[in-house]
Amino acid sequence: MALPTCASNRHGQIGEKMAKKNDTELWRPRQGERIAYERWQEVSLRRLEDDTRIQLAPKPRRLQHSLSVARTAEHLAVLYDVDPYLARAAGLLHDWDKVVSNEELILRAKHFGIDLGVPLEQVVPLLHGMVAARELPDRYPHLPVEVWHAIACHTSAAQDMGPLDMVLFVADGIEPLRRATEGISATRALVGHASLEDVYWNAFVGGIIYVLEGGRYLLPRTIEVYNSQARSRAQRART
């Protein structure tokens, strides 16, 4: 399994569930919104949520964020014709290793051979998804590789982002518990009115701007991802 690069290059489209143009909060899961899952999926999601509650119990705010991302990812998946079961599963597990110390996270990343081209000490905030994507498949072998790709990519993105990758990336950035900055509000406003690819692109570029404005370290590979995706978008615009 090649991680953290996301292998899929399919792009989500707005499905039949796209709502009216004057609805400005299509990004927000509706209270009481439920998906008609198969029994085995319900059992699986219940187990994942129970495990997540135990794993993240030392960090209640992180737990609430993960639960909110799971609901938002599920909602976006329905809106954009992506598998909501996989989206909710990825949302529940995406911050699994946020309870791990920086030192331990670096050790685990080195153990798994994660190489980002720079000292791992410089990019610790990016590691938890990549590490979890390598640790958790043995614990949850019923989940397909797409879930682990999405989790691995959710902090740094990748050159080829598939629909599930985009759904998790966006959900992580716009879930309702996040403060409504200008960039987050702009991404939220696009949901349901633009393609999943365009919503993701807005979130991705907004994240880069956030890093630059805060004077934070920008992973060189992120520039490569940006340039690659910008070229692809330009080429598609010309066809």
Image (cartoon, rainbow, N blue to C red):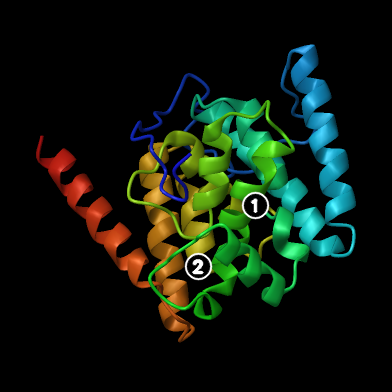
Q: Residue at x 58, y 73 (%)?
A: 124
| Residue 86 spot, x, y in % from top left | 62, 30
Residue located 74% across and 20% down the image: 41
Q: Residues within 10 Å of mark 1 (few under 14, many from 20)?
A: many
Question: Which residue is the site of mark 2?
Answer: 182
Can residue 152 be seen? yes
Residue positioned 77% across, 47% down in the render: 67
Is 191 placed above or below 111 here?
Answer: above
Q: Earlier in the sequence, mark 2 or mark 1?
A: 1
Residue 224, image x and y in percent?
28, 62
Q: Is residue 235 left or right of residue 103?
A: left
Left or right: 216 with respect to 236? right
- SS at badge 1: helix
What type is the residue that disc 2 sits on?
Glu
The residue closer to the viewer here, 210 or 42, is 42
Q: Tag 2, which secondary structure?
A: helix
Q: Which residue is mark 1?
A: 132
Residue at 75 percent across and 25 percent down: it is 34
Separation of residues labelled 2 and 1 (CA atoms): 30 Å
Q: Are marks 2 and 1 in contact (CB under 8 Å)?
A: no
Mark 2 vs mark 1: in front: 1
Residue 29 seen in the current view: no
Q: Give coordinates of residue 114: x percent, y percent.
A: 49, 61
